[in-house]
Amino acid sequence: MARNSQISQSSSLEPFASPDYLDPQLQKVLEDACSLLCQWFAKAGQTGPLPLVTGLPEISPRMEGLSGEALMADIQLLMDGSYQPSHPGALAHLDPPPLTASIVGDLISAGLNNNLLAEELSPSLSRLERKLCKWFAEQLGMPLGSGGVAASGGTLSNLMALVVARQLSGLECDPSAVIFASADAHVSLAKAIRVMGLPCDALQRVCTNTQGQISLEDLEEQLKRLRSKGRKCFAVVATAGTTVRGAVDPLVELANLASREGLWLHIDAAIGGVFALSKTTSTLIRGISAADSVSVNPQKLLGITKTSSLLLMARKSDLKAVFSTGLPYIEPAWEEAHGGEMGIQGTRSAEVLKLWLGLRQLGKDGIKQLLDQSILRRNYLEQKIEPSKFNLLSGPLHLIAMTPKGLDDNAAAAWSVLTRKFLLEKKLMLSRPIHEGRYYLKAVTGNPHTSLELLERLAILLNNSVEITNQ
Ligand SMILES: Cc1ncc(COP(=O)(O)O)c(C=O)c1O
């Protein structure tokens, strides 16, 4: 490290920031990188959601390290080939433009390079995580003693919740264990079952009603049948915002059923959970407060940069009870428990920083506006789609999927491919999910740059696409 101070006047980029002086080269390279990024945003409207070119820079490091300028040129190539969430026509997925303060949070978090594994490696950030999770759980109406942990994505939050549920039900690796979830619940549950070493039929899919919500009758019937066969049914996963249409399961009724039947209630609110942050939208996920555990992904709508997911527990102590193994190489926790003892991940970055900064930048009014506008856009698009031409799948949130009426499944698949391609040429990007064996085109209306005029144009193109395909 003495080397740094000796060559303080050198113009080459030092590999590490000097601990002794403000390094102008470091500052320049960070400013250059910020400038590249700002230019990338500024051009978003002209390009399109998907890049025209996908060049890749050289992969392997050269014998000699690269200068700051050469690194910037490489980054530019990657940026030119990147998906552009800030384009107003980026409507395909739950991947909105990044919130400004959240970008800053990521940069600062990288610079701090603290580790949420242990308190002595992230003194202030560990406390921030604990307090922010508690605050978030309170917004959901969860009880005193609730709290949680940040996780790198909803898949991991769901997995951790189910591991806790199983462990606390005393089942360990019993292959007769059963979890219920609706047919429309997210695929991450199937992954969780595999990781937990359970057979495929440990995840029992329950059919949905016409609104895409789990059928309570079917759930009760399956529960009775499986229990009579000796299966150990221990959890039900409700979804607050299904991935294709944004349906919200009947949370109040599921909470009653779970409590009556001694089932753990996990709510996968990766999509819908953030709607609790505004009074006007919190009614859409009424009943969420009664969950034993909840997954929330602020990355999906609020623009918190990836990854941002929280696992929130009614009893925060459940996390420690299940995941704590002792960290023999780390000083004891100062307050409650080390971050690395609260979940599956060990070393992890301070993802909570960009969530906290992002929420603070928006303020309660900004959050409300983002949530309200996303639903307003979905309503608008829904009104403009001709009901005589399409079967629509939607729900109370900001997702809508459509497939033409009067076409068989093969013709609908062909329509979806052709129409998506045609729309992409017009810089409008929808996704093409398959639901109950049939292809749909799906729009997610959370992009704050998407105007009602653009949605009107999209609806006209969609309405016309059916006639074009039928010719
Ligand atoms: C309802 C739902 N749950 C969980 C997930 C998984 O989240 P992630 O992609 O962050 O792992 C998704 C992803 O789209 C989802 O839609």
Image (cartoon, rainbow, N blue to C red):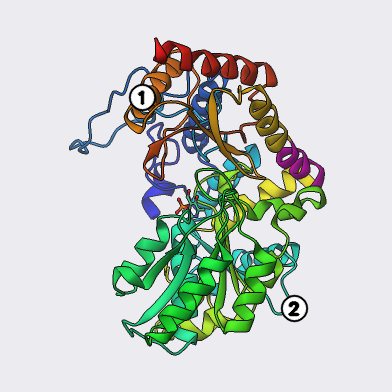
In this picture, residue 51 sits left or right of residue 442: left
Q: Which residue is mark 2?
A: 144
Q: Which kind of residue does numbered mark 1 sit on?
A: Val
The residue located at (82%, 52%) in the rendering is 279
The N terminus is located in which quarter? bottom left
Q: Which kind of residue does numbered mark 2 sit on?
A: Leu
Asked if the stretch drawn in magenta spans residue 256, the answer is: no
Nearest to the observer: residue 96 or residue 453: 453
Asked if residue 69 shows in the view, the reply is: no
What x and y, as percent, mark residue 126? 59, 68
Nearest to the observer: residue 49 or residue 105: 49
The residue located at (54%, 55%) in the rendering is 351
Q: Which residue is mark 1?
A: 417
Are there few (<14), some (14-19), or many (20+) residues within 10 Å of tag 1? Answer: some
Are there few (<14), some (14-19), or many (20+) residues within 10 Å of tag 2? Answer: few
Q: Secondary structure at mark 1?
A: helix
Q: Is residue 142 above or below residue 468?
A: below
State the residue lying farthest toward the left: 63
What range is drawn magenta here? 364-372
In this picture, residue 41 sits left or right of residue 344: right
* Distance of label 1 from label 2 (alpha carbons): 50 Å
Main secondary structure type of the part rendered in magenta: helix
Give the image quarter of residue 353.
bottom right
